[in-house]
Image (cartoon, rainbow, N blue to C red):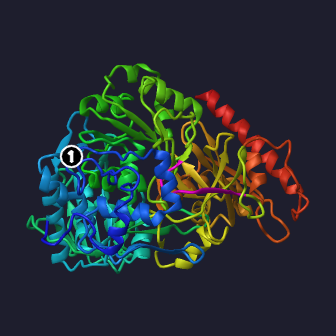
Amino acid sequence: TPEGWEGRGTGSEERRCSSLTADRSGSTWPRAAGGPGSSGPTELSRLSHGDLYRLSVTDPDRFWGSAAADRLRWAEPFHRVRDCDLSSGRIGWFLGGKLNVSVNCLDVHVEKHPDRVALIWERDEPGTEVKVTYRELLETTCRLANALKSHGINKGDRVAIYMSVSPLAVAAMLACVRIGAVHTVVFAGFSSDALAGRIQDAGCKAVITFNEGVRGGRVIQLKAMVDAAVKTCPSVQHVFVCQRTETPAVMGERDVRLEEPAVCAPEPLDSEDLLFLLYTSGSTGKPKGVVHTQAGYLLYASLTHQYVFDYRDGDVFGCVADVGWITGHSYVVYGPLCNGATTVLFESTPVYPNPGRYWETVERLRISQFYGAPTALRLLLKYGESWVKKYDRSSLRTLGSVGEPINHEAWHWFHSVVGEGRCPLVDTWWQTETGGVCIAPRPADEGAPIVPAMAMRPFFGIQPVLMGEKGEPLSGNDITGALCISQPWPGIARSIYGDHQRFVDAYFKPYPGFYFSGDGAYRSEDGFYQITGRMDDVINVSGHRLGTAEIEDALDEHPAVPETAVIGIPHDIKGEVPFAFVVLKEDLSDDAPAVLQQLRDLVATKIAKYAVPEHFLVVTRLPKTRSGKIMRRILRKVAMETTEDLGDVSTLDDPSVVKEIIEAHEEYRKQREEEKKKK
């Protein structure tokens, strides 16, 4: 690590904040196990979690200032803990400080335990895991960083990463971080059109990819996808190509093979310099590039990783998310590596080569914490208990659920069968925009209960508020409202790239002075929180947030389709699926089957295969108000076959349209039943 990079802050603000617990217990802030500034295993403060939480919301400067000073290595100390104004969307943490995220995730651990395993790459081929030490990961990161620098990638430049889960994908992220470039990881399941849209919005100067990807026994043509995408991306100067399979990549003029020296000095970056962009769907058709910055994000990912999952020195942390999502960023890469953990990279699928894949991996790698999605759990539940009980899961200590609210059946199966009833199951609520877990059953004081299928308790610094229909905070318990948070925390997103006003309008304008999550929640009689689902036109398909407007935009590009409406309906495995109501031009009604197949292909091409609607219903027109607004609640009731009470339809321009749609759906339902019988 370069000379002058201090183990903790030394400014006046740090000295003022470092007494977090000294006046109460004589001990210092509990550090991450084996992390920066740590001399050994975690020494927990004598403060209870309840006391720590109260301190975090009553004196956030003292709480977060002490945490940042003790847990992170700084090139220059910060002089002010925060400067935030939620009404304008102005958010700044650890002002004046400089650090490098890759130093905190790699160099500090290489100094102390260079041969500790940083990554266990659970390759698609079962039983072929690859272990990468912190020293090896630092060397690979530096090689990639040097390659980027030698080809003109500098601080502030945006770099797209389009790779399957692998050590090279992690090294690519950290290489960008090391030189101050801003990475945007694009899920390797997205189409070339979706990739191009993200590259264009971010103005990426380079793309890092594989020749091919592998998942579930299938080969994915990643380089070919990038070649197609960059044809419409004039900002891209270079495509850096790594090898995942033995198939040679077809190289063009701007393509570069990655081979460079293994030492690269880290760039000291301001606490509020951009760290990464991550594109997520919203209630409009255009995905938004959520901006996260350096110090605050890293601190929050580190703290939540340690406390929510009870991470301890020597654990093997198993989050099976893809690095293309925020879960992979926070709990496969940045949180675990900042804490000096051994983190698993899961390249395959839950059912390849059989439904025991997760649990065989747990046995073989001796995984301590397993963090997965309800979608996968619901899928595996249908295969029975034998695939679970076939394998030794005694290494498991904590189970976690992410991506959507978990239903009771999946919760009890996960807890009782997988965890044998002995592992705490943390149902975590958070978002791309929050940077890390905001509500979860843990941490909590010893003996505190866990209520099944409920996120329950806010994390340090998180103050949930439920809002009523008139925009007023709701007091008391046993109530439901819009889930907001009343004060900022270090991990919160800073903006939407290139459109700060959209950021303000989406998150801070609906309830001035509060962060609006877009979700509804129920506060129980005991004061615990349960997420009730989205309140806007965003659906959750297999844990992936998807804007219905984004699907509609793709469908509306077809020349035979004057208009569409897409809503989400419940699904036993995927949680929710899109249901598309499609209006065709009158002279094309006989060609409906061919057009619908073209629409499926269009969505797969424009977005991804998982975005293709599960249902298409051709209708002659959509239910609209006199002002032209589509009444989606009526469409939702039709799709879910709950049309007994349609509510007030007096505002419709022509109420008779409802009867037409119900009759069309009844005919569609009969056709599907006939098809099932034939199968």
Q: Amino acid at mark 1?
A: Gly
Task: Using the rendered view, name the quadrant where residue 645 is placed.
Answer: top right
Residue most extreme to the right: 650
Q: Is residue 143 visible?
A: yes
Residue displayed at 41% across by 19% down: 386
Residue displayed at 32% across by 56% down: 334
- List x then y, in percent, for residue 472: 74, 62
Depicted 488 relative to depicted 668: above or below: below
- List x then y, in percent, for residue 383: 46, 25
Task: Using the rendered view, name the quadrant where residue 149 is placed.
Answer: bottom left
Task: Using the rendered view, name the quadrant where residue 486 is placed.
Answer: bottom right
Residue most extreme to the left: 261
The residue range painted magenta reads: 458-467
- List x then y, in percent, for residue 131: 17, 43
- Please tell me whether mark 1 sits on a helix, a strand or a loop: loop
Residue displayed at 52% across by 53% down: 54
Apparent side of residue 40 relative to residue 352 in the rendered image (left or right): left
Depicted 392 relative to depicted 240: above or below: above
**Location of the N terminus (image quadrant):** bottom left
**Location of the C terminus (image quadrant):** top right
Q: Is residue 431 visible?
A: no
Foreground residue, 291 or 572?
Answer: 291
Residue at numbered disc 1: 40
Foreground residue, 370 or 581?
Answer: 370
